[in-house]
Image (cartoon, grey):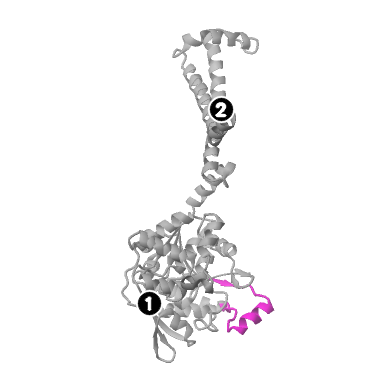
Amino acid sequence: MISRYRIRRLLAPTAGLWSGVALALAGLSIFVIGFAVSFKDLILPAITSTARWWRGVLGHIVPLDSVPQANHYLAGAMLVLGGYLTFLGVRSVVGKVAETLNPALGAKVVNEYTRRQRLAQGPRIVAIGGGTGLSTLLRGLKQYSSNITAIVTVTDDGGSSGRLVQEMGIIPPGDMRNCLVALADAEKLMTDLFQHRFKNEAGSLSGHSIGNLLIAALVEQSDGDFEQALKRASDVLAIRGRVIPSTLSHVRLRALMENGTELCGETKIVEAGMRIRRIFLDPEEAEPHPEALDAIREAEIICIGPGSIYTSVIPNLLVPGIADAIAESQAIRAYICNVMTQPGESDSFTAAEHLVTLQANIPVRVVDYVLVNTGIPSQATLEKYRGSGQHLVEADEDRLRAMGFRIVRGDYMSESDYVRHDPSRLAGRIMELLER
């Protein structure tokens, strides 16, 4: 004999679900009967006695001349009651299914559905860059749209990414990992896991990010298909949008320095401490990612930056075909200027000098609007940055206007341990550009 406890245990997981199903079926049945009655003769013989009773009940309220008129009142009442019960039952079933699949969602399923529908109808946005700058921007943009394509640089040759490039021959995953996490709709526990980095005492794992290792594992599981690995990682993190490399070719950066020497490799270029005159891809003829070109052609707004001008922004535009696609696009094209200068890359650069550098390396015009920060960090923060050779980027607006750019000024700054862009303020201003 099965105890009540065991019965409850057996029924508990689906108790709420089945009660909802039963309610929905009962409501649907009443609704169908009411609908049938509204056609008079379909099941009239079976309910004649009920109709006569209704006639007696309703007779003192509304004059009734015949049984069929009473049937109409009955049918109307049953339609309303049945429709309402069906609604309650369906809502209960959907809520239980949603709660089972995602306990955190629970009764918020309608709000979540509405939110996702709103994001799915959001603008088509392309964001181009790499490093922490691009991921910061994506955190803000995902609040407005899930139609986001992040086109990410693949020239990183240092740290965990550089080691995986050497050991496994894959495309450097670090910048793409940051963008995946920025667009993630997954639980915070999962995103924190992706970003966790092993400490120095971790032996052979020292310095590696778990997210980089997971992407490398997914590449291996996908028989070396990096695109498929990215799609699987996107599914794991439930990202809003997509992340794609600017090219699937193995490329490095090559730079002509101010003293005339040439250096190859992003790490060597940045650590040289010399001003960069020109930057190139090595090899120069890399194949652009087809989905990147398609996304640019379909975009309503294209955001370039923020990020390291020479090592995060320009490398994407050096991939053959990408700059030309942007130049031909009818989308709004905006460059987001950095808040602080970067040692060994943009020392003492003003906002206008960032654009001069961009135009010197890219043969076509790819920018119409320039977003410049007018916020000023605290004096203590400025002193701390000055000690490491970094300064606030001057917003020389007159020079930018003389170069033919439209200025979008504002306080886009977030000041905590670091001075960076505020994702919400930045994304909000970009959406205002679209609404113009």
Residue plotted at (59% across, 83% down): 388
Q: Is residue 78 left or right of residue 311?
A: right
* Residue range highlighted in magenta: 371-396
Q: Is residue 386 magenta?
A: yes
Q: Residues within 10 Å of mark 2 (few under 14, many from 20)?
A: many
- Residue highlighted by disc 2: 85
Q: Mark 1 belongs to which amino acid? A: Arg
Q: Quadrant of residue 249?
A: bottom left
Indicate yes or no whether the magenta region holds residue 122: no
Of the numbered discs in the image, which one, if any, rests on residue 213? none
Q: Name the spot of residue 54 as percent of width and height, x first.
A: 59, 11
Q: Is residue 203 visible?
A: yes
Q: Nearer the viewer, mark 1 or mark 2?
A: 1
Which kind of residue does numbered mark 2 sit on? Leu
Label located before the other in sequence (1 or 2):
2
As drawn, the label of residue 252 is 1
Secondary element at tag 2: helix
Real-space CA distance between mark 1 and mark 2, rounded to the nearest whole angstrom:
65 Å
